[in-house]
Image (cartoon, rainbow, N blue to C red):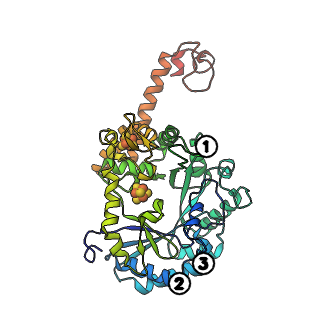
């Protein structure tokens, strides 16, 4: 698009919200529900006119490259399947021969049936399905309007996707109810759901000042959650299970940023409301960050506007000194500005609420990430790190057995004394 609009990025990402914030569920931590206040008396349904303009402008503003059409909510499936069928027809109408379109849809999954499954498969949609873990952990906050848990319905939605061979990601929010159960959550996704792409998104609900609600994840708690999963992933799942946060960290080690929150600058991930209003970001759907409406101004012009470019630069320009001097800044870059509402130890405002967790995780993962980045740079598979870990773990175990006294806990982790476990017939045989 840069040939039409100087200053604009080569490509940008746009989340379209055809039902605005409206959803059929009532998840307790959902910050979108309160956004209904932004559009009083609205029907919260994207009109056909806005849909067509959106598709046309999005395709026109990209070159002959891949273009992402990403639907999110609220709950976008409330628009009905016909809306999405029309969106595909508009894509065919406006797509240039060289353009390849990738579709994605984020959904709570509760309204999916076989007609949806067939449609999503036919057009190669990637579906982001919101699941917070096994039933008890999922149902803690992901409830319907009557307050009942939604696990069963979501699993039915997942079964539809699997039956039709639709590619899916699991989007798991991390909050007070599941944050202390990282491995239970991770293994459930991997082993029970057969998921291969996972996102762990922290819930940070800000209250007055710099306080957060009791549902929010603690900063260090989030870091520990990621580390526990990382330790299992790096030993057995690298190359088979893809965790967005780990991919992002590895990318940073080779100078590539796939996630806006960890990029030095942002501003290339905008949000389109149901009525055509375009906002700087889905996290900033509020009057100060309204860029205009696609019925009056071209999307390309708004993306390239100085207001939007400044929004993106501000991420870097407002970094506190504490971040600028941080050893893991290259991977973290201060996180999302939306969450920068605490002060640094020196009292400077603008530090990310999740700082302690980010620092913990990025520091912990530094060595293995460097090793994997080195493998990548030598055209080798990052999964080779699993062999390294297997060797190191075996050596570590041997040393622990050699050091164990008769009355110590057995290094195998059984919880029994060494003399009653692997040391029962003499330490030598235990090795
Ligand atoms: S404000 Fe946050 S979520 Fe939005 S684009 Fe910037 S980093 Fe990404
Ligand atoms: S870990 Fe903390 S100090 Fe370091 S860049 Fe991230 S937010 Fe800033």
Name the residue beneath numbered marker 3: 81
Secondary element under disc 1, as helix, strand or loop, is loop
Q: Which residue is mark 1?
A: 214
Which residue in the protein does label 2 denote? 48
Residue 381 can be seen in this image: no
The spot of residue 313 in percent (x, y) is: 31, 57
Nearest the eye: 126 or 80: 80
Q: Nearer the viewer, residue 202 or 373?
A: 202
Ligand 1's quadrant is: bottom left
The 10 Å Cα crowd at callout 2, few under 14, some 14 to 19, many 20 or more, is few
Give the image location of residue 219, x and y in percent. 49, 40
Q: Quadrant of residue 39?
A: bottom right
Q: CA distance from mark 1 to mark 2?
A: 41 Å
Dot 3: within a 10 Å radius of its alpha carbon, few (fewer than 14), some, or many (20 or more) residues? some
**Total of numbered circles in the picture?**
3
Q: Earlier in the sequence, mark 1 or mark 2?
A: 2
Q: Secondary structure at mark 2?
A: helix
Is residue 116 left or right of 169 when viewed as pictured?
A: right
């Amino acid at each position: 698009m840069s040939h039409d609009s100087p200053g604009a990025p080569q490509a940008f990402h746009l989340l379209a919200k055809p039902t605005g914030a409206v959803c059929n569920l009532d998840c307790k931590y959902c910050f979108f529900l309160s956004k209904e206040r932004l559009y009083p008396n609205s029907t919260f349904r994207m009109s056909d006119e806005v849909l067509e303009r959106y598709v046309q402008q999005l395709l026109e503003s990209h070159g002959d490259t891949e273009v992402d059409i990403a639907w999110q909510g609220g709950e976008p499936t409330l628009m009905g399947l016909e809306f999405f069928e029309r969106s595909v027809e508009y894509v065919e109408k406006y797509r240039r021969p060289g353009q390849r379109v990738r579709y994605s849809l984020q959904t709570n999954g509760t309204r999916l049936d076989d007609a949806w499954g067939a449609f999503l498969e036919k057009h190669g949609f990637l579906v982001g399905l919101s699941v917070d873990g096994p039933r008890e952990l999922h149902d803690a906050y992901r409830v319907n309007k009557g307050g009942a848990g939604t696990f069963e319905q979501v699993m039915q939605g997942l079964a539809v996707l699997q039956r039709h061979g639709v590619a899916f990601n699991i989007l798991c929010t991390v909050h007070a109810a599941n944050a202390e159960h990282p491995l239970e959550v991770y293994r459930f996704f991997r082993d029970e759901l057969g998921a291969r792409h996972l996102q762990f998104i922290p819930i940070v609900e800000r209250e007055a000042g710099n306080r957060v609600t009791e549902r929010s994840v603690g900063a260090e708690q989030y870091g520990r959650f990621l580390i526990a999963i990382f330790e299992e992933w790096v030993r057995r799942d690298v190359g088979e299970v893809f965790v967005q946060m780990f991919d992002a960290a590895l990318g940073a080690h080779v100078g590539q940023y796939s996630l806006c929150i960890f990029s030095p600058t942002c501003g290339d991930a905008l949000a389109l409301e149901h009525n055509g209003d375009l906002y700087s970001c889905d996290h900033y759907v509020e009057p100060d960050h309204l860029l205009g409406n696609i019925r009056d101004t071209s999307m390309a012009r708004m993306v390239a506007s100085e207001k939007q470019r400044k929004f993106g630069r501000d991420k870097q320009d407002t970094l506190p000194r504490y971040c600028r001097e941080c050893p893991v800044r290259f991977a973290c870059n201060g996180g999302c500005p939306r969450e920068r509402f605490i002060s640094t130890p020196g009292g400077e405002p603008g530090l990310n609420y999740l700082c302690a967790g980010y620092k913990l995780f990025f520091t912990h993962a530094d060595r293995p990430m460097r090793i994997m980045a080195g493998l990548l740079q030598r055209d080798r598979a990052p999964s080779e790190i699993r062999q390294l870990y297997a060797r190191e773990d075996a050596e570590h175990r041997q040393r622990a057995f050699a050091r164990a006294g008769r009355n110590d806990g057995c290094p195998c982790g059984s919880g029994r004394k060494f003399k009653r476990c692997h040391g029962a017939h003499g330490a030598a045989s235990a090795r």
